[in-house]
Image: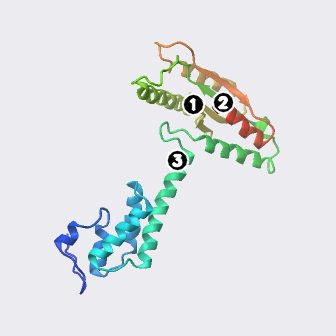
Amino acid sequence: MPTTEPEAGVRWTDQVRSGLPPRFDAVAEALASGSASEEPCSVAGTQMAKDGAGLDETLDALAETYRLVRGTEPAYRDVRAVAQGWSDATLAYLHQMACEDPMTGLASLAHVRTRLSELYRGELRGPGRVRDTHALVVAELPMEGHEDPADPFQAKHVLTRAMRLSDLGEAARTVFAGTETIGRLGPDRIVVVVERDDRLGQRVALLRRMARTLQDPGRGGSARVWIEGLPGTDSVAALLLDELARC
């Protein structure tokens, strides 16, 4: 790896290198050589965000890098580049969290609501009403017995339940393999936004059979799958989703 040639007046020693904040080596090398530093700053900001560092911590790391290498305050352009890299990475993460449940990979309830709102807005352009052209397919894991919150294995139960819900989601994706939105309604339910067609009943019957294979033989109850009709307005559809998520 080529050695960075420092500019006059720049401190670039082994001691400086060893004291650099994590993720800011490339920034320090750019500052020491006098080359453009905006791009390394943007990358450092992105990496810090992915590491879970806050913006204050990220800007402090930039200031420490400047202090060690140049003995000055950070240039505005580099502060902006670091902040932009950090904010872009953070917004991308938040957007992903808003659209997808991280434990099961299913769409979030907020994303399902957004999809329904898009359909209702489309009524203004299309010939059909949403309640006639679309429906919800709801699938629910078998009910389990009472769980003691003090049970030391409670966390394991929650994880196992989430894995089974993820498997139920995969079954739904197998049956509804098109552009349908498949989301999580709660710890035990998923929902699929589907078009009403001649094959809907057959698909629901297939999903019901597949859902039964996910039952725990050691526990009672059986999986349920049913079709839920949609109301006439977007606002009432939102209330329906909330009610299904609470049950």
User: Eyeballing the image, is 53 above or below 133?
Assistant: below
Real-space Cα separation, disc 2 to disc 1, in angstroms: 9 Å
- Which x, y percent locates residue 112? 64, 41
Figure quadrant of residue 14: bottom left
Which residue matches tag 3?
A: 97
Label 1 crowd (10 A; few <14 / some 14-19 / many >=20): many
Give whichever of 174, 11 is nearer the camera: 11
Q: Do the residues labelled 2 and 1 touch (CB within 8 Å)?
A: yes
Q: What element carries label 3?
A: helix
- Which x, y percent locates residue 231? 78, 35
Which residue matches tag 1?
A: 172
In the rendering, which numbered label is found on residue 230?
none
Asked if residue 201 lies left or right of residue 156, the reply is right
* Image quadrant containing the C terminus: top right
* Residue 195 visible in the current orientation: no
Q: Residue sitting at 50 percent across and 56 percent down? A: 92
Q: Is mark 1 on a helix, strand or loop?
A: helix
Label 2 crowd (10 A; few <14 / some 14-19 / many >=20): many
Mark nearer the N terminus (2 vs 1): 2
Figure quadrant of residue 177: top right
Identify residue type, mark 3.
Answer: Met
Identify residue type, mark 2.
Answer: Val
Q: How many labels does the image show?
A: 3
Asked if residue 35 lies left or right of residue 182, the reply is left
Real-space Cα separation, disc 1 to disc 3, in angstroms: 21 Å
Label 3 crowd (10 A; few <14 / some 14-19 / many >=20): some
Which residue matches tag 2?
A: 137
